[in-house]
Amino acid sequence: MTSQAASFLEHLEVVRNLSPRTIAGYRRDLCDFEEFIQVHLGREDYRWAEIDRTTIRAFLGESGRRGLAPRTIARKLAAIRAFLRHLHQEGEIATNPARLVRGPKLDRTLPGHMRLPEMEELFRWTESRAAQLNDLTTTRLLAALELFYGSGLRLAELGSLDVGSLDLDRKQLRVLGKGRKERIVPITESAATAVRNYMPRRHEAAAGDCRALFVGKHGNRLSNRYIQRTVQGAISRFASAANLSVHSLRHTFATHLLDAGADLMAVKELLGHASLGTTQIYAHTSRERLRRVYRGAHPRA
């Protein structure tokens, strides 16, 4: 990796405070681009000022011939744009040649989500098991489901929660989202109740110095993979749509809010999206809400 690319990654970590996982993704994409440049130019002693739109387009074309998905290619182009923009801002190159390079056309797929009756069945089943067994596993699952669906959390956000992240009296929690941006989100009454019922089991299992909200039987923080597997197993019992994931609960959270008439900007803030465009995709899933608006507003509906 060139010194400029290494400096850019350090900038992402120190200045922009991006997560290690995001930085690792930038590293892979830039290394891939640098390897291509060396082969494309036939030498290793190139300068970034030599890289033009033709080189970048050639890299995208080669990525397509390698069978990479359009979204993967678009992500690589985004990494290149960000890196070259940084070099331009630092005065190391005169212009950003990636600025006007078009990425592959992406299909706008609607996110999968669970219907309200399915969510109600899921919670009835989980609540029944938690009340009956009252052990670490069942009370923990109910608390996790309530926070996923009630607050629209990402998997990594829920997994990183500490006990001190929640204020059950005020019914809110503090979470670090993408880019390590902190936001305060509300929690539902049922989520607060589920967490209170889980806490005695958590205290029995937790190691003395463990601050994590969700712990395993050995007292340490649960891995995201474990949370994903157990929650997805519960979802699969009641979801009619195939291949729904833990992230589908976040989609369900947004869709049900919009179906009930919530403002799109409010949902954007709750989800922690940087731009409204990211949130707008959920508007396309809320067909029932649109029907209600149409029937209530159109004179001949």
Image (tube, grey):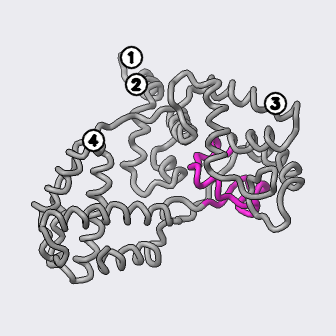
C-beta proximity under 8 Å, tags 1 and 2: yes
As for residue 301 lying within the magenta part, the answer is: no
Q: Amino acid at mark 4?
A: Leu
Residue on which disc 3 sits: 129
Q: Which residue is mark 4?
A: 106
**Crowd class of label 3 (few under 14; some 14 to 19; many from 20; radius 10 Å):** some
**Which residue is at a point 15% across and 72% down the rendered structure image?**
43
Instruction: Relative to 196, say whether 42 is above or below.
Output: below
Q: CA distance from mark 1 to mark 2?
A: 7 Å
Ranked by sequence position, the earlier of labels 1 and 4 is: 4
The secondary structure type at the circle numbered 1 is loop
Q: Residue 192: x, y in percent?
A: 77, 47
Residue assigned mark 1: 301
CA separation, marks 4 and 2?
30 Å
The amino acid at mark 1 is: Ala
Which residue is under mark 2?
A: 294
Q: Is residue 187 left or right of residue 14?
A: right
Task: Report the residue at 36% width, 35% height from top.
Answer: 109
Mark 1, other Cα within 10 Å: few <14 / some 14–19 / many ≥20: few
Residue 189 point in image, percent of width and height = 75, 43
Q: Of the two numbered discs 3 and 4 on the same chain, state the one appearing first in sequence.
A: 4
Expressed as whole percent of the image width and height from the top left, the position of residue 112 reads 48, 32
Please tell me which residue is depicted at 15% across the width and 67% down the height of the picture: 97
The quarter of the displayed image where residue 221 is located? bottom right
Q: Who comes first in sequence, dot 4 or dot 2?
A: 4
| Start-end of magenta stretch | 147-175
Mark 1 or 4: in front is: 4
Is the residue under label 4 in contact with that under label 1 (CB below 8 Å)?
no
Identify which residue, 27 or 245, lies in the foreground: 27
